[in-house]
Image (cartoon, rainbow, N blue to C red):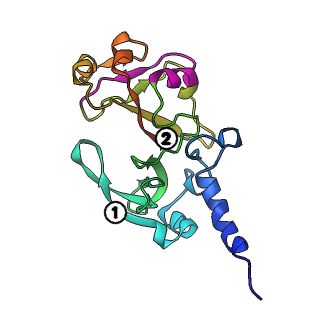
């Protein structure tokens, strides 16, 4: 007896929906919305992700960390830049206990709280309900949000993960960027920040450990 292809694909599509859940309210928006549940939950492991997505879609390899460091990670969809996600483990030896998930540079998926790559400072302020603080640009941690100032985005997302956001600057803004550079914090509504026109360059999900 033959089985319809749609029935064979159904389990995989269900897993993908759990890991990259589409919010019906934003079905027309560019890209899916990441979820902190399903295969990408706090109790995940490399073995579980491998079982969920298959050997062709999951590899273990060294990836870039902070300050030029190389660190081991489970890479989901390594050959598809638009779906690539790097997973880091609290127990690296056992590759278990999800510590953080970092979408690839070309992955346009939004965080569970609605922050999406490409958003402006003003758009993120609107989601947060108030201004926030971010680090100056031009160094390893440049453009990272350092304090949501008690806004909506300070709260953990459904599933218990927290969302980290990092802003970047467009090329050709060197003169303006120099005014917001260095290891210091700025308010998001600072006129110098607004003049530099930062955009959300990357997001990451994290699962705090006791």
Which residue is most to the right?
1
Q: Is residue 146 left or right of residue 34?
A: left
82 in relation to 191, above or below: below
Left/right of residue 173 with respect to residue 13 in the rendered view: left
Of callouts 2 and 1, the N-terminal one: 1
Residue 136 located within the stretch drawn in magenta: yes
Percent of width and height locating residue 132: 46, 19
Q: Locate residue 182 relative to residue 77 in the image: left or right.
A: left
Which residue lies at the image location 53% right of the left edge and 27% below the top edge? Answer: 154
Residue in view at x 44 percent, y 55 percent: 84
Which of labels 2 and 1 is toward the front?
1
Up-down relation of residue 62 to residue 25 (above or below) = below
* Front-most of residues 170 and 17: 170
Give the magenta range. 121-138
Residue at mark 1? 61
* The N terminus, quarter of image: bottom right
In the rendered view, would you say 104 is above or below 116? Answer: below
The mark found on residue 208 in the picture is: 2
Q: Which picture quadrant has residue 16?
A: bottom right
């Amino acid at each position: 007896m033959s089985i319809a292809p749609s029935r064979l694909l159904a389990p995989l599509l269900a897993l993908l929906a759990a890991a990259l859940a589409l919010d019906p309210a934003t079905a027309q928006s560019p890209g899916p919305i990441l979820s902190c549940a399903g295969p990408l939950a706090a109790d995940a492991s490399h073995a579980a992700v491998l079982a969920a997505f298959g050997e062709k879609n999951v590899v273990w390899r060294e990836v870039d960390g902070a300050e030029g460091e190389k660190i081991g990670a489970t890479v989901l969809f390594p050959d598809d830049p638009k779906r690539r996600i790097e997973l880091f483990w609290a127990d690296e030896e056992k590759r278990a206990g999800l510590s953080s998930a970092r979408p690839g540079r070309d992955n346009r998926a939004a965080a569970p709280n609605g922050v999406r790559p490409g958003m402006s400072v003003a758009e993120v302020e609107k989601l947060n309900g108030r201004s926030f603080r971010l680090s100056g640009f031009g160094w390893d941690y440049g453009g990272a949000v350092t304090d949501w100032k008690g806004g909506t985005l300070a709260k953990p997302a459904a599933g218990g993960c927290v969302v980290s956001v990092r802003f970047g600057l467009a090329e050709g803004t060197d003169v303006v960027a120099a005014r917001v550079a260095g290891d210091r914090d700025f308010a998001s509504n600072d006129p110098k920040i607004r003049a530099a026109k930062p955009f959300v360059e990357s997001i990451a999900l994290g699962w705090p450990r006791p």
